[in-house]
Amino acid sequence: MKPFITFTKERYKLYRNYFFFTLSDFIYKLHQKYFHLKEISSYETEAILAYIIQTLSLQHFDYLDENSKSLKDLVSFLISVKRNELHIDDFEFESTKKSELKKILYAYNDFLNRHNLADLGDIEKNVYNLTKEKKIVIIADQFENDNIHFFTSRLQKKIFDNLDKEFADIKIEPSLQNHYLVPSFNSFDEVKNALKIVRDLIENGENIEDIKIVASDIDEYYPLFKALFDEYGLIGYSTKGEKLKDLICINNQIAKAKYEALKTEAAQLKKRLEHYGIKRKNILKDLLEDRRVLIKNNGIEITETNQIYVYSNIKHLIFVGADITHFPPKREKNIFYVKDYETKFFANSLYRSAIDIYEHMKRISTNLYVLYSQYQGKTKRVLSFIIDKNLPTYRAKTKADIEQIKENKRVTIECMENFLKDLDSQQLDEYNGKNVGNFQVNALSASRINEYLKCPRIYFYKNILHLKAPIEESKEMEVTVQGMIMHKAFEAIVNYIKNEKCDIQEIKDLKKDFAQKAYQEILAQEELEENIYTKLYFQKLLDILDNFIIYLVEDWKDKNRYKNSYMEEHFYLDEKLKISDEKNYFIKGVIDRIDVNDEVEIFDYKSKKTDKLDYDKIEEIIEIKDVQLGLYTYWVKQKYQKSVTSSLITFNTNNIYVKFATLRECDAPKISRGKSQFACYNDEYEKRLKETIFNTKQNIENGNFVYNDSNEDVCKWCDYEVMCKRY
């Protein structure tokens, strides 16, 4: 019987009558049948490369070891080079880096040859040579169309071309009748709207089997679905499966069996590596980190965009994550990948792939619902340009949801009686920041100055009238509270590292304890109850701490920076902006971290999600609409009399960390594509900084709190918007 060769195992849904393999599995089968080499996994490749790097005399890559995050990048790069028949000279690396990459690759290949081992690149090369000589007959799926292909390497394509094949085909009749757009406030509301649509359809007689949800980023969206299923009386599952490490904690029997099998696999792997002279710690934990299990497949199915090709006809298809941030998706980060990645590594254009995925959704669905979020945090999002324009808007309200809306629409405003009466008035008066009177300003901080510069009326409501902002019950966890928890956990980890000799794995093992303690302390301090929003943030915090720990151990502790680092450094300035103390100050603040060496570096930790420079924030710093880094720099220059660089840094990123805005001493900022890459601190900047601080003090004392319309985006996120009259 001729085997049917396809590109994903899920295609069985279309070709159930065939005996089939994916092309990758078929290549492995051929290699096992005709070659007598031990095939190694990517994990074994990592272990071998870490071992080789330790034995070589390297300058550029000497920092790499078994715990380095960049080691996975190196493995991916070198295997891709082999699978696409490339050479290191094909890449424009700096000479030392290129020379050392050649040395590493040569030593790695020599190691494999001496021990009769084969990685994926070797397997594909061997099978390609086999198919040049031997006739192999198959039935083939369609691996290419006008826009994209489903090969994962150049060698895979060459193997496929050598096979003797006849093509199977499945005809998809265009069936799209209704095409809707569902705008949502944020990702959380996107998921709520998706579940409302599902619930609405079921209440109107549709079968759950006729409804599918596709997510542009299943790792981001599925945890939200999972958290909200109960609220809408639904169940569901991810086709990507659940993380095994999460399932073990809830005493799942299938997970236990999988875990026992994984323990056996880890023991065998440990034995093999020791045979090659390689000792590797924490093998079981490493394998557990990425292992997934499909526990059940009942309820609503949630799948990834790259799995959309397994379907031929769906009555109701719900697509979440159609904003430009998610769709087209971003290429996975790798420090070795270059701008012409697609050409060198035989990869599809992400743009062309996204177009094809969207067109396929339209081909296979009768009703297509496209959901996108308009905001992420305080960042505005827009609909992807790939999505059709001028689509009708769909809004679903289930029977259960209507009752919920009635309850959740209650808004409580706790403030003075006169202010409540004033809300009905159309006149500007003292409750709106006009002719308020005189005030004595005894103390300020960077955050309070920024608050005034952003909008004087917010400052007035919060710090003069001391009004509690209206709060909706459904509101997400406050960003300030998130930041407090994150800072608390950071501080605990840093103190532990400074006082203990420990490796990265040891700290990672303890990260949940650090996070849990910070989480519970801040919730108690702020008198907050645990709910779905706080639980979701806690899970996100664990990922942030992973990056923070890697940064500390690899980039910080190993360079002995902690010896001259100061955490949570309090500072005080008097009314003349001279260094003072806690008994006599006009401005006070806390700096997250100061590294004092030949030069001084200041770091302010932020919870912002970003992978790149924030040009808007850099412009705010340049224009002194944000005084935080300027004020920190000013105080540190007085204290240490050294050159200072200050940065806003986040670990909530797909990288390890990102310094998304920097203020450094210089005459003029570096300009690229018309945008400043950083802000410059010099005599002129310091003069403007002082003027801004003194002017802010003067304006507050004169009672100037009238609405500032310089940035209306602030209003969209203002807790006081419901009570504010703008003129």
Image: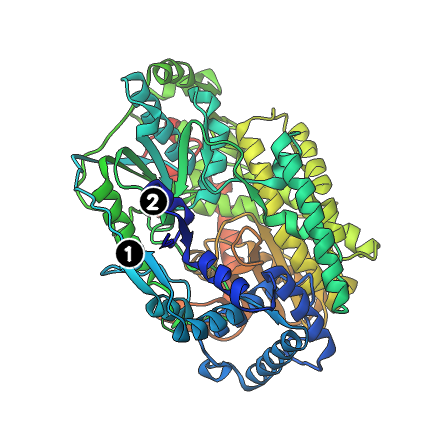
Q: Is residue 710 above or below residue 25?
A: above
Residue pictured at 61% horizontal, 24% vertical: 529
Figure quadrant of the C terminus: top left
**Left or right of 325: which side holds 278?**
right
For marks 2 and 1, give the CA distance. Answer: 12 Å
**Left or right of 279: which side holds 89?**
left
Q: Residue furthest right?
A: 500
Residue 671: x, y in percent?
Answer: 41, 72
The disc labelled 2 sits on which kind of residue? Val
The disc labelled 1 sits on which kind of residue? Gln
Q: Is residue 287 above or below residue 476?
A: below
Residue 361: x, y in percent?
Answer: 26, 44
Residue pictured at 71% horizontal, 46% vertical: 263
Q: Which mark is residue 61?
A: none
Badge 2 crowding class, 10 Å Cα cut-off, few under 14, some 14 to 19, many 20 or more, is some
Q: Residue furthest front?
A: 1
Q: Which mark is residue 310?
A: 2
* Closer-to-camera residue (598/86): 86
Please name the residue that numbered disc 1 is placed on.
142
Q: Quadrant of residue 641?
A: bottom right
